[in-house]
Image (cartoon, grey):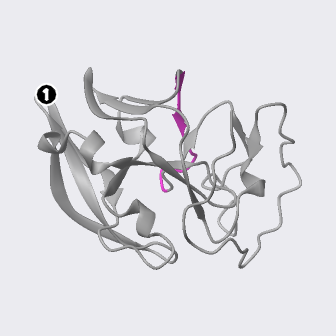
């Protein structure tokens, strides 16, 4: 597998966070979230990623991007062209990221249910993050299935961050108890 190259944005580290004493050493084919940069880096995903709810594929892409930030699992951003926009509704919720800017949230509406704030996007991202404009990310813990290649992802701890944890990423991850200062 080739190494993805960063897309836009500075490749510098700001506000470094020292790794915890219980940092996991990555094995062959693994990455440590403690080797990810701060500010975050955007890079292309070299495998297929998917999101499924109630057996319906909501997003499916071989052109996704991922955002990598110190101590966080990768967050996957799908091009809008690879998302079932007919199953999304604006939720009215928003948030702010110091690096990427103002996010808007989207709910998933399938016949059996509505999942509030299941995903988010940055319609006008800050400088250095323009690559994620016209892309949408999903919380793993809000959808039924999130896939990276042939592996089903699990959510980053804490239900705040949108990271997708797979066997190829080791932590510990921010979001769980005792990680507020990371």
Q: Is residue 152 above or below residue 130?
A: above
Q: Magenta span covers which residues?
A: 151-160
Q: Is residue 110 above or below residue 64?
A: above
- Figure label count: 1
Please tell me whether residue 169 belongs to the stretch shown in magenta. no
| Residue placed most toward the observer, 83 or 51 | 83
Residue 159 horizontal side relative to residue 121, left or right: right
Image x and y of residue 133, in percent: 35, 64
What is the quadrant of the C terminus in the image? Answer: bottom right
- Give residue 85's quadrant in the image: top left
| Residue placed most toward the observer, 85 or 5 | 5
| Residue placed most toward the observer, 145 or 121 | 121
Residue 26 horizontal side relative to residue 173, left or right: right
Residue under label 1: 112
- Give residue 40's quadrant in the image: bottom right
Image x and y of residue 107, in percent: 22, 49
What is the quadrant of the N terminus in the image? Answer: top right
Where disc 1 sits, the SS reads loop
Q: Is residue 87 above or below residue 20?
A: above
Q: Residues within 10 Å of mark 1 (few under 14, many from 20)?
A: few
Image x and y of residue 148, in percent: 51, 31
Question: Residue at the location (68% across, 69% down)?
Answer: 38
Image x and y of residue 66, in percent: 52, 50
What main secondary structure does the magenta stretch of the protein show?
A: loop
Residue 30 horizontal side relative to residue 110, left or right: right
Question: Residue at the location (34% across, 66% down)?
Answer: 122
């Amino acid at each position: 597998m080739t190494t993805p190259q960063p897309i836009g944005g500075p490749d510098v580290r700001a506000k470094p966070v020292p790794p915890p004493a219980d940092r996991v050493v990555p094995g062959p084919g693994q990455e440590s979230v403690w080797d990810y940069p701060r500010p975050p880096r955007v890079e292309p995903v070299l495998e297929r990623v998917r999101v499924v709810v109630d057996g319906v594929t909501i997003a499916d892409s071989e052109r996704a991007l991922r955002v990598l930030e110190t101590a966080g699992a990768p967050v996957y951003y799908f091009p809008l062209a690879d998302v079932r926009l007919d199953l999304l509704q604006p939720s009215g919720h928003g948030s702010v990221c110091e690096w990427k800017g103002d996010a808007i949230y989207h709910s998933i509406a399938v016949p059996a249910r509505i999942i509030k704030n299941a995903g988010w996007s940055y319609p006008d991202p800050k400088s250095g993050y323009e690559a994620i404009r016209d892309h949408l990310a999903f919380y793993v813990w809000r959808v039924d299935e999130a896939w990276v290649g042939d592996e089903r992802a699990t959510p980053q701890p804490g239900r705040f961050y949108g990271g997708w944890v797979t066997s190829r990423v080791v932590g510990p991850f921010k979001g769980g108890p005792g990680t507020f200062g990371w």
